[in-house]
Amino acid sequence: MEKSIYSAEYQQLCRLLRELRQEAGLTQVQLAERLGVPQSFVSKYETGERRLDVVELRHIVESIGASFADFVSKIDSHLRP
């Protein structure tokens, strides 16, 4: 298992998070305000420059207005070979 934040799987996760935010009609600035973090935090995890832990991931998904369980299912279906 590759541990790099640059793995194809992690980049897919970043892409899904970006798409989820865009589908919700939110800018990076708006999401950052909901999370109480700088806009650069959102930019860095969306580009894969910053790695997220599961707690941060849950907060992000819920701040976008989505179900964490549904998002995890979506990740699973996209990352299966």
Image (cartoon, helix red, strand yellow):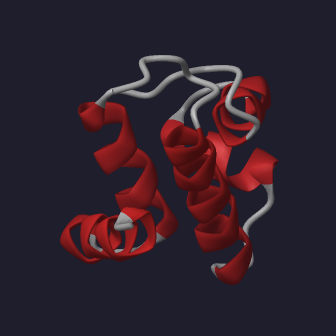
Judge left or right: residue 40 versus residue 79.
right
Judge left or right: residue 2 versus residue 40.
left
The residue sitting at 67% across, 57% down in the picture is: 15
In the picture, the quarter occupied by the C terminus is bottom left
Q: Position of residue 17 (x, y in %)?
A: 57, 58
17 relative to 43, above or below: below
Instruction: Tell which of 63 and 69 is nearer to you.
Output: 69
55 relative to 78, above or below: above
Question: Hey, which quadrant is residue 21 in on the image?
Answer: bottom right
Judge left or right: residue 30 versus residue 70.
right
In the picture, the quarter occupied by the N terminus is top left
Judge left or right: residue 68 versus residue 39.
left
Q: Position of residue 4 (x, y in %)?
A: 53, 17
The residue sitting at 30% across, 48% down in the picture is: 58
Q: Position of residue 12 (x, y in %)?
A: 59, 54
Q: Position of residue 65 (x, y in %)?
A: 43, 72
Q: Residue furthest left?
A: 69
25 relative to 50, above or below: below
The residue sitting at 30% across, 67% down in the picture is: 76
The residue sitting at 41% across, 62% down in the picture is: 79
